[in-house]
Image: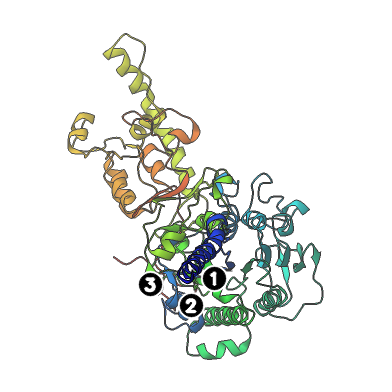
Amino acid sequence: MQAAAAALAVLSVVLGLDGLRAHRSEPNQNHTEPKKKKTQPHIIFILTDDQGFNDIGYHNPTLKTPTLDKLAAEGVTLENYYVQPICTPSRSQLITGRYQIHTGLQHSIIRPSQPSCLPAHMDTLPERLRQAGYATHMVGKWHLGFYRKACLPTRKGFDSFFGSLTGSVDYYSYGSCDGPGLCGYDLHDDEGVAWGQEGKYSTTLFTQRARKILESHDPADRPLFLLLSLQAVHTPLQTPKSYIYPYRDMANVARRKFAAMVSTVDEAVRNVTYALRKHGYYRNSVIIYSTDNGAQPFTGGSNWPLRGRKGTYWEGGVRGVAFVHSPLLRRRRRVSKALLHITDWFPTLVALAGGNASESRGLDGFDVWPTISEGRESPRQEILHNIDPLHKPPAQTTKWGAASGPKKPKKKKKKIQKKRIHKLKPKQKSAFRLKSTKKPQTFSHHAVQLKATKPLPQSKPKPKTRAQAQNQSPRPKSYSSGAPPAAGTSHSRSQIQSRPGSKSRRNASRNQDPPASASEAQLGPHSGPRNGSRPTAGWPQPPWDASVQAAIRVGDWKLLTGDPGHGDWVPPQVPPQIRTPAPP
């Protein structure tokens, strides 16, 4: 009996343990834990104005930017990053993620009195981030139109706005002008005027508002998108005197003031990053720093060693300063040579926020976060800088590409041509009658012009026939684009000299300035597709009008047509009145 009782006790203990184990394992088998929602980072985008490639400490040690240098060194420096050559197009591409040819803003900036703004049918970056649950705020320069309320930042996705709506504002008085007598006060808080701020330096004022936003927002409650669009370092060159003192040894006054303004930007970024750490944003934040276009060397900026300046499609006008700093980067402390463009921020930031960028139709940007964070290959292989068919070539260019006014000598030349054509008409008629009785052959205007500009023989040696001239003169080169190169390229001048024609024209081309565009040099000023006339005899119809201002980059190659702008290399410390020729 005792043995049986002991066996029953042991059996009950075993069964109890099995039941307990089954009870404990039951929740693990039936309960499914909810998936953790992807953490949405706080996004701080700092956009400067007219800061050139050589206007930051890690490119130029003469500029004192310790905060920017440290953030770039601890993050990812973007050394193959491109923007647009002027303010409005760059800002429109940042906000919409589309090339400016799709927004109608490819021609110039939006002037204060111009009734233009972002297209109403296009969604914007702050709108997409707000849909993803972000609080969206903008502080600083807008410059994307304000002629009606639908154009204002608060109607384009921002919960709040504090700053200026036009492109160039006085740093202390906030006065903005669009010509003589067309001036006003341009400082706004949301959709009203922010009166009473005169005398406060704009960079300091904008930084204070940004810090106030960071202080009042709860980072644990809702992710934040803050666009701090500083007016600096755009003209006018104004800065507190205390920032000028460290640069007192600079001989160029404009450069000295410009460098001081860069230092104010560095201090502003230091104050913002301090607020991010203080209020609990930093560990889950992405800080992006970018310029909107290249610098203007003759007002203190520097793009050295790049060619060109603000407003041009040379590298100095479109290759921008930028870096990304974030604890969320997987590979930090490095320099990225991947090809990136300002349109890429739209899909990149929408994806970071957990959104789907494909819901925005017609985007020209790419999601480049894996490229920035992990060092992967960039999905971008080309950049369309612009196509502007309304941009006409200058009337006449000097040796270095500057406009020199109306072509008065050319009018005189036309009169001479008319006289020569008049003298040649009898010969042409008699020649037709002798050679053939068929309908007289019709020559293009260009062919007549070439024949007419050839001087009549006056003395020996006997002038060469057309067949002899064609045998001795090199034939014009053919181009893959179907059109001769644009003015300002290295081929245009040599190509003009190698063109078949009279000796007098070839000699004149060595001493005179190059023509306004290569298309005029090759096709003649009155022929070609620009005015709808038929192509010149011997030249096929070009698939692209080379007089149209356009620029595209594919890989490491860039194609420029039309007038790309002044192509000087301007080293720093050059006085404004001196224009430096290109190095050999």
- In this image, 131 relative to 582: left or right? right
Residue 529, percent across and down? 45, 33
- Type of residue at label 2? Leu
Q: CA distance from mark 1 to mark 3?
A: 16 Å
Give the Cα distance between marks 2 and 3.
Answer: 11 Å
Quadrant for the C terminus, please. Answer: bottom left
Residue 255 vertical placement versus 467 (above, below): below
Residue found at the far front of this picture? 1
Q: Secondary structure at mark 3?
A: strand
* Residue named by callout 2: 71
Q: Is residue 55 visible?
A: yes
Label 1 SS: strand
**Image marks 1 and 2: residues in contact by CB distance under 8 Å:** yes
Is residue 204 or residue 172 the one in the foreground? Answer: 204
Q: For the residue carrying disc 3, how many other residues have a C-alpha within 10 Å: few (<14), some (14-19), or many (20+)?
A: some
Separation (CA) of disc 1 from disc 2: 9 Å
Is any part of residue 577 visible from this angle? no
Q: Nearer the viewer, residue 135 or 313?
A: 135
Q: Is residue 211 left or right of residue 38?
A: right
Residue 334 circle label: 3
The first of marks 1 and 2 along the sequence is 2
Where residue 67 appears, as percent x and y from the top left, is 51, 82
Q: Is residue 121 above or below residue 88?
A: above
Residue lying at 37% horizontally and 43% vertically, measured from the top left: 521
Q: Give x and y (percent) for residue 294.
A: 49, 65
Amino acid type at mark 3? Arg
Work out whether mark 1 precedes mark 3 in sequence or the reverse, and give the earlier one. 1
Identify residue type, mark 1: Ile
Examine the rendered structure and indicate whether residue 68 appears above or below residue 504: below
Residue position marked by numbered label 1 in the rendering: 287
Residue 102 picture quarter: top right
Q: Earlier in the sequence, mark 2 or mark 3?
A: 2
